Amino acid sequence: MDKICLLFGALALVLELVILVPALGLSALLLWIVCFVSFIAVYSYPYLKILFTRAVGGVVHAFKTLREYLPATSQ
């Protein structure tokens, strides 16, 4: 949580810089966006991996159950 607070504190400074010196501020804003996205990607990856693994497992189980209820068709 502390890292998020630091990121948003830095965002406030970057936005002030955008107002005072637009060219330098926009480049600093771009750097802040890259840092923020990398932070989110690194810290949310384990949770997303677990979420998708469980979701796919649930879908596979649902289709197996559905397959048991449907009658088999002969060709």
Image (cartoon, helix red, strand yellow):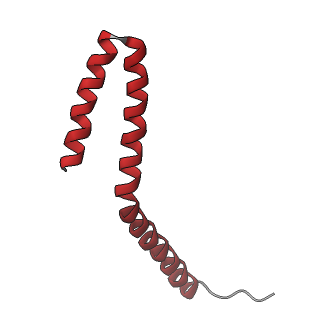
State how many labels appear: 0
> Who's the residue at 25% across and 32% down the image?
10
Q: Quadrant of residue 44 in the image?
A: bottom left
Residue 70 coordinates in the image, percent (x, y): 59, 83
Q: Residue furthest right?
A: 75
As displayed, is residue 37 above or below residue 51? Answer: above
**Image quarter for residue 64?**
bottom right
Q: What residue lies at 43% left-to-right and 66% top-to-bottom?
A: 49
Residue 60: percent from left, percent from top = 52, 77
Quarter of the picture containing the C terminus is: bottom right
Tell which of 66 and 59 is nearer to you: 59
Q: Using residue 6 as the reference point, say whether residue 74 is left or right of it.
A: right
- Residue 55 relative to residue 17: left or right: right
Front-most of residues 35 and 47: 35
Name the residue located 36 percent from the left edge and 64 percent from the top edge.
47
Quadrant in the picture for residue 19: top left
Q: Residue at x 38, y 40 (%)?
A: 35
Q: Is residue 73 above or below residue 49?
A: below
Q: Nearer the viewer, residue 19 or 54?
A: 19
Task: Please provide percent x and percent y for residue 5.
Answer: 19, 41
* Relative image position of residue 6 (x, y in whole percent): 22, 40
